[in-house]
Image (cartoon, grey):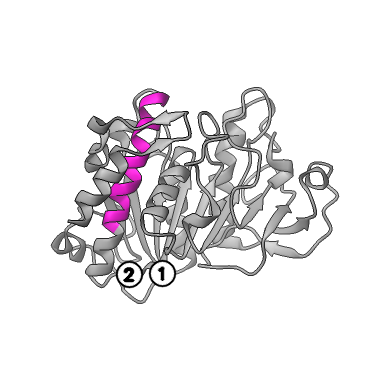
């Protein structure tokens, strides 16, 4: 019954005049598939669906954090984002890791992928509810990590669950059609929302250059990442590369800024906070800047 309610709400959602969800597209998220990983099953993972019986085949540990990774446009479960973040996470700690594949739509045109975001997020919320029913997780133990359009998928999933998931991390959320959109990722989508901005400014920027979460990190000013030269895509991808590095090394300490101008001029001297990690919540809020190196682990 809840899934039917979620589908109806997804079908008639209208996004601030920029993105309209066609009722016929309400079932786009039904084509999601999920791969579960644990330290014992860290290489290939186990494909499962949103039924309790299928979830139980993965061997998740109910005492651990459940981290869900959502790719963006042109991504699949097997593109570099997913194995990189998954491997870094399982090296650094024991956790339940779920990779969401919505490539049936993400590999289509950007406009088609955008139209699928609400439904993909709604179906992800239904999966999370099934994880709770199966005793695998509680909403307080769920961390959704989304890159590019996947950050907005995470937002839809979190708000469908009334903002009760523990944490969402948005990795350079897509800006095209989302910059002023009221349905983009926002701080009310989870108890703690962290956003890492790496390509938020410039003529061909992929991301959003303004704060969205409880905490917004702007590595190297949030644009033109070291070593990327003129490649906007390189700067965009740096968001998940930096996040993966923090999982293993916990080394990127950012300073709080009093304003975006202070952040842009590299004048932030406030309290420090570690960027990234898999911690379910952190103390502090606001805008932060960290300066990094050119190559991994940055």
Determine the residue positioned at 31% across, 72% down.
61
Whether the magenta-drawn stretch holds residue 120 is answered as yes
Residue in front for this viewpoint, 207 or 239: 207
Q: Position of residue 214 (x, y in %)?
A: 61, 58
Residue in front for this viewpoint, 257 or 294: 257
Left/right placement of residue 273 relative to residue 172 reads: right
Crowding near pointer 2: few (<14 within 10 Å), some, many (20+)?
many
Left/right placement of residue 284 relative to residue 195 reads: right
Q: Is mark 2 in CB contact (under 8 Å) with mark 1?
A: yes
Question: From mark 2 to mark 1, how far is it between C-alphas?
Answer: 6 Å
Disc 2, SS: loop
Q: Which residue occupies the extreme bottom position in the image?
A: 63
Q: Quadrant of residue 95?
A: bottom left
Q: Main secondary structure of the magenta part?
A: helix
Determine the residue positioned at 28% across, 38% down.
11
Left/right placement of residue 198 relative to residue 126 reads: right
Q: Position of residue 28 (x, y in %)?
A: 26, 36
Disc 1, SS: helix
Determine the residue positioned at 82% across, 53% down.
268
Which dot marks residue 137? Answer: 2
Is there any visible trace of residue 109 in the rendered image?
Answer: yes
Whether the magenta-drawn stretch holds residue 37 is answered as no
User: Which stretch is magenta?
Assistant: 110-127
Please tell me whether residue 116 is drawn above or below residue 214 in the rendered image.
above
Mark 1, residue position: 141
Crowding near pointer 1: few (<14 within 10 Å), some, many (20+)?
some
């Amino acid at each position: 019954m809840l899934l039917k309610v979620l589908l109806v709400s997804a079908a008639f959602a209208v996004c601030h005049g920029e993105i309209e969800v066609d009722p016929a597209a309400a079932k786009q998220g039904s084509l999601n598939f999920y791969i579960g990983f644990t330290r014992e099953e860290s290489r290939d993972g186990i494909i499962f669906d949103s039924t309790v019986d299928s979830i139980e085949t993965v061997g998740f540990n109910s005492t651990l954090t459940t981290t869900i990774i959502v790719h963006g446009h042109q991504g699949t479960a097997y593109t570099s984002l997913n194995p990189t973040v998954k491997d870094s996470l399982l090296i650094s700690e024991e956790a339940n890791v779920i990779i969401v594949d919505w490539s049936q739509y993400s590999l289509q045109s950007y406009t088609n992928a955008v139209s699928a975001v609400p439904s993909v997020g709604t179906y992800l919320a239904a999966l999370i509810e099934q994880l709770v029913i199966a005793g695998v997780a509680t909403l307080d133990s769920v961390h959704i990590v989304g890159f590019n359009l996947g950050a907005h998928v995470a937002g839809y999933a979190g708000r469908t669950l009334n903002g009760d998931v523990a944490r969402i991390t948005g990795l350079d959320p897509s800006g095209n059609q989302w910059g002023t959109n009221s349905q983009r990722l926002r701080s009310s989508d989870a108890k703690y929302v962290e956003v890492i901005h790496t390509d938020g400014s410039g003529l061909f920027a992929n991301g959003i250059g303004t704060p969205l979460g409880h905490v917004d990190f702007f590595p190297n000013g949030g644009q033109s990442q070291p070593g990327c030269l003129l490649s906007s895509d390189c700067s965009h991808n740096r968001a998940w590369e930096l996040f993966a590095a923090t999982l293993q090394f916990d080394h990127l300490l950012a300073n709080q800024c009093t304003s975006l101008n202070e952040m842009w001029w590299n004048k932030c001297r406030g309290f420090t906070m570690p960027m990234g990690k898999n911690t379910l919540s952190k103390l502090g809020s606001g805008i932060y800047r960290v300066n990094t190196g050119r190559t991994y682990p940055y």
